[in-house]
């Protein structure tokens, strides 16, 4: 991946910039990386904070080769296996392996190091395409974390005490993304499930599942199902495992 690499000093969001390139016919594996995003987007409608020079913000275009089907859940593994790949690419670079918080937050010492926003076009008529957007806190010192992130976020420089070469980090992560995602795009998810499970800090933990119109449910996260859902054993009633959409 990254044989077509667009490096921008500034854009609104690399996911949005790459979507325009995708609509103009950009190839599978194209990457857009920006030093600064003016409107970086996070999951669930949140914004993504980063400072010029300090972070790694990039998006990867994946063009699927298979039509969607009811029995194979490979599309759900694109964002999850991307989390695995980013954790491994970081480990290749700084010899510290982050953990994953389901579905795909990257954690170090229980704090958020980065996140992934995967956006896709899923239709039954043609193979889907995905834009996988990755944001990591790299050379951001503790003192420069915004107030609201002080107790919850971390960065690679905070964890290692040394500045990290962002180009090398990007190259290692792209290599791992190719290794982890190409089998998934071929519909092979067994390796993705086991690699993800090995890195997932949520499994074995107590979690709270939030519902729009009902009180939260407390449970024990037991595993990730083949369709990517988190399987949660309810601790509030004797019913069997429940599938969490969001935790
Ligand atoms: C999250 O944890 O909520 C996901 C954050 C994803 C941020 C990245 S930065 C590169 C790409 N472009 C965006 O606008 N968002 C993603």
Image (spheres, grey):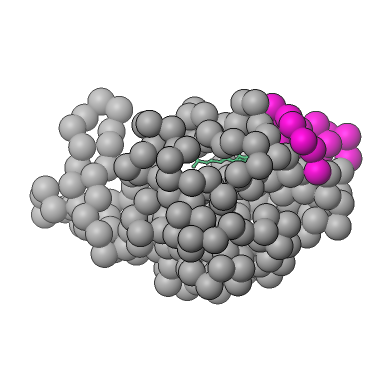
Q: Is residue 197 above or below residue 114?
A: below
Q: Position of residue 181 (x, y in %)?
A: 66, 63
Which residue is found at the position 66% from the left and 32% from the top?
37
Side of 108 where 116 appears, left or right:
right
Magenta-colored span: 7-25
Side of 175 where 215 appears, left or right:
left
Quadrant containing ligand 1: top right
Q: Is residue 8 visible?
A: yes
Q: Position of residue 222 (x, y in %)?
A: 29, 63
Q: Residue furthest left?
A: 237
Q: Is residue 8 magenta?
A: yes
Which residue is found at the position 45% from the left and 54% from the top?
158
Q: Quadrant of the N terminus?
A: bottom right
Q: Position of residue 88 (x, y in %)?
A: 56, 68
Side of 201 where 137 appears, left or right:
right
Which residue is found at the position 47% from the left and 73% from the top?
194
Which residue is found at the position 48% from the left and 68% from the top?
97
* Residue toward you, 124 or 38: 38
* Residue toward you, 234 or 160: 160
Give the quadrant of residue 214. Answer: top left
């Amino acid at each position: 991946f990254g044989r077509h690499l667009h490096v921008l000093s500034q854009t609104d969001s690399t996911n949005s910039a790459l979507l325009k390139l995708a609509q103009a016919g950009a190839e599978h594996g194209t990457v857009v990386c920006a030093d600064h995003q003016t409107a970086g987007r996070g999951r669930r409608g949140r914004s993504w904070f980063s400072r010029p020079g300090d972070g790694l913000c990039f998006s990867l275009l994946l063009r699927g080769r298979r039509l969607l089907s009811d029995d194979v859940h490979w599309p759900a593994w694109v964002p999850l296996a991307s989390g695995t790949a980013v954790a491994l690419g970081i480990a290749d670079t700084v010899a510290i392996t982050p953990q994953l918080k389901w579905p795909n937050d990257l954690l170090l010492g229980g704090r958020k190091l980065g996140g992934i926003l995967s956006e896709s076009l899923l239709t039954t008529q043609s193979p889907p395409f995905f834009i996988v957007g990755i944001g990591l806190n790299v050379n951001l010192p503790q003192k420069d974390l915004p107030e609201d992130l002080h107790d919850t976020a971390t960065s690679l420089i905070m964890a290692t005490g040394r500045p990290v070469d962002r180009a090398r980090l990007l190259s290692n992560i792209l290599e791992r993304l190719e290794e982890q995602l190409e089998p998934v795009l071929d519909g092979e998810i067994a390796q993705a499930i086991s690699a993800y499970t090995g890195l997932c800090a949520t499994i074995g933990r107590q979690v709270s599942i939030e519902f729009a119109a009902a009180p939260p449910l407390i449970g024990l996260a037991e595993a990730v199902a083949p369709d990517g859902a988190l399987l949660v054993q309810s601790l509030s009633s004797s019913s069997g495992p429940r599938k969490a959409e969001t935790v």
